[in-house]
Image (cartoon, rainbow, N blue to C red):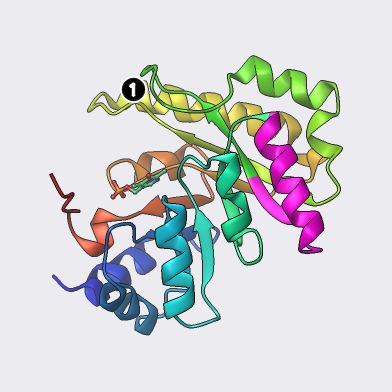
Amino acid sequence: MTIHSNLRKLQTELPESVTLVAVSKTKPIEDLMQAYEAGQRIFGENKVQELKDKFSSLPQDIQWHMIGHLQRNKVKYIASFVALIHGVDSLRLLQEINRQGALHQRKIPCLLQVHIAQEETKFGWDISEVQNLIEKGEINKFEYVRVDGLMGMATFTDDEKQITKEFTTLKILYNQHQKTQGWKVLSMGMSNDYQLAISCGSNMVRVGSKIFGERQYAK
Ligand SMILES: *Cc1c(COP(=O)(O)O)cnc(C)c1O
């Protein structure tokens, strides 16, 4: 299977209301170009340096999403161009994004990452913390940040009931605040669980290996 045909297959499979983020982390420029030539314009990366390098080498009409954990001291490297930051998980990070947005005179689109998985290691706010932030109006006090919605990752398991439960929990939180907050994006679902995520109400999926093949990590 080629990148082109993988992508075409996905594009026909996804409902029109679902945005596809092609997760290209660790993949070479040539692979991204193949996806670009097949019409893909939204790419997701999880490392700041790699995101920055790829942004400089690839066509300007690509929208770059930062999908990984973002350290505050690295926001400055992507603030001028990043199209969406998926993994916002602290107020201090929001503050820094706001500061960088002000410097670049742009409102930076962000998603709040919510912890829905059983694993301790996954980043994100608890549901109750998000409720609290919203009640106190804390996420909307930043002039140069636009919170567009929520992002979450399910537990790494084959248990579809468990995954469904987690995605549904996030969808309920999203629905609760979508109108009053003006949210548009619910980012959930990866190669292994995007169909489930969509059936639970996701409108943005982050798919990597199903497009580009398995990733090779240096040992
Ligand atoms: C790597 C990654 C993905 C894509 O994973 P695949 O299983 O290759 O589709 C999606 N979201 C995040 C946050 C990731 O880090």
Please indicate whether residue 37 sits to the left or right of residue 69 in the image: left
Seen as rendered, the residue at the extreme front is: 73
Q: Residue 126, image x and y in percent?
A: 58, 19
Question: Of 36 and 7, which appears nearest the observer?
Answer: 36
Residue 120 shown left or right of residue 92 in the figure: left
The residue sitting at 51% across, 44% down in the picture is 202
Q: Any atom of ligand 1 within 8 Å of the CB at mark 1?
A: no
Q: Which residues are magenta?
A: 91-110
Name the image quarter holding the N terminus.
bottom left
Q: Quadrant of residue 107?
A: bottom right
**Viewport quadrant of the C terminus:** top left
Q: Residues within 10 Å of mark 1 (few under 14, many from 20)?
A: few
Name the residue located 48 percent from the left edge and 65 percent from the top edge.
52
Left/right of residue 128 with respect to residue 45 in the rendered view: right
**Label 1 sits on what residue type?**
Lys
Magenta region, main secondary structure: helix
- Please indicate, yes or no, whether residue 146 appears anywhere in the rendered image: no
Question: Residue 12: x percent and y percent?
Answer: 36, 68
Q: Residue placed at 35% from the left, 21% from the top?
A: 162
Which of 164/98 is in front?
A: 98
- Looking at the picture, how far across and down is residue 53, in whole percent? 43, 68
Q: In the depicted view, which residue is nearer to us: 126 or 70? A: 70
User: Which image quadrant for residue 165?
Assistant: top left
Q: Secondary structure at mark 1?
A: helix
Residue 153, above or below 129: below
| Residue wearing tag 1 | 161
